[in-house]
Amino acid sequence: MPIDLESRGPVAILTLNRPEALNALSPELLDELEERLAAVERTPRAQVVVLTGAGDRAFSAGADIGHMQSASALEARAYARRGHEITDRIEDFPKPVIAAVNGYALGGGCELALACDIRIAAESARFGQPEVNLGIVPGWGGTQRLARATSLGFAKEMILTGRPVDAAEALRVGLVNHVHPREELLDRAVEMAEAIASKPAWTIASAKALCNLALDGDLKGHLQREIDAFALAFTTPEQREGMTAFFEKRPPRFSEL
Ligand code: CO8
């Protein structure tokens, strides 16, 4: 199977499993990733996703160069669109997705990680947008999401030079939130996922959707949406329980609602 799905309590771990090609994102792998995400979406118990790569070498070395080598412009357009469908699906997924970057995250692999809500990395991780070395430009969102995750200047440096960035530098520029030894990476990702899963699912989905608007252009409209979503929270039992628990000086019991 090019994608493994493992459940650990409320956490669904999706593993890109094509280590012989450094988990390159073939069309088959993208199809299966979409199917797995749909299965996770249908499973109420699965509340947070951790996305990682099989093996010690790569999260993903990007789009499948073999598939692209002799592609026509129309075929390349279809492949780019397919990647966008998946990255948009992850960005808009109603449950948080944490990327546990266990090695190379290059080209489409970096772009896949960028579509996730939170990135943590192994000390051995390497990020890069090496498309210029192949005579192409990033095609799965890298020209937009990398600048949003870091800064426009840093994104331009990565994209225009193709220079890979190690985990320490990725941490410094905000591309990842934490760096861990390789052997601890998955456990740390699952711990973070469990912490998120302990909160009310509706609140988490709403907060994710709102945060996604933060870097869009329409600040005033999005601030209004925040006001509306804030008010809507007060129609839920989770808000009553959370605030009651605060004054009763006890942890909230969201799971019983
Ligand atoms: N696609 C297909 N196969 C790959 C890929 C890839 N992206 N990356 C590695 N492989 C394969 C290699 O061909 C090799 O296979 P084999 O053993 O059969 O020869 C195997 O994985 C191991 O790789 P290497 O032998 O090269 O391992 P090294 O340790 O020497 O090097 C690197 C590791 C540095 C990661 C090197 O493999 C590399 O540079 N890979 C390519 C990275 C890259 O350029 N990625 C960007 C691809 S373009 C892209 O992602 C654009 C996304 C948007 C597309 C839009 C659609 C048009």
Image: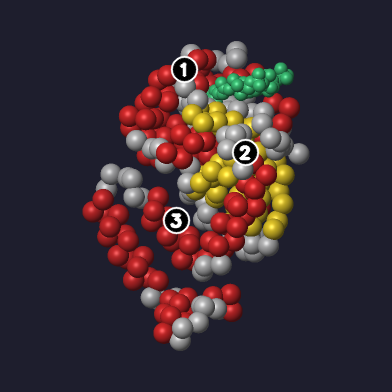
Q: Residue at x 72, y 52 (%)?
A: 6
Residue type pointed to by label 3: Lys
- Residue 109 % position (x, y): 56, 32
Residue type pointed to by label 1: Val
Task: Give the residue number, with chain letter if any, for mark 2.
Answer: 102
Frontmost residue, 72 versus 123:
123
Neighbor class of circle 1 (other Cα within 10 Å; few <14, some 14-19, many 20+) is: some
> The residue tagged with tag 2: helix, strand or loop?
loop
Q: In which quadrant will I find the N terminus?
A: top right
Q: Ligand 1 lies in which image quarter? A: top right
Q: Are marks 1 and 2 in contact (CB under 8 Å)?
A: no
Task: Give the residue number, with chain letter if any, for mark 3.
Answer: 208
Q: Residue at x 68, y 62 (%)?
A: 9
Neighbor class of circle 3 (other Cα within 10 Å; few <14, some 14-19, many 20+) is: some
- Residue 110 % position (x, y): 52, 33
Task: Give the residue number, with chain letter if any, for mark 1.
Answer: 132
Query: Between disc 1 and disc 3, whose residue precedes?
Result: 1
- Residue 115 % position (x, y): 49, 41
Classify 163 as above or below 45: above
Residue type pointed to by label 2: Asn
Q: CA distance from mark 3 to mark 2?
A: 24 Å
Neighbor class of circle 2 (other Cα within 10 Å; few <14, some 14-19, many 20+) is: many
Number of numbered callouts drawn = 3
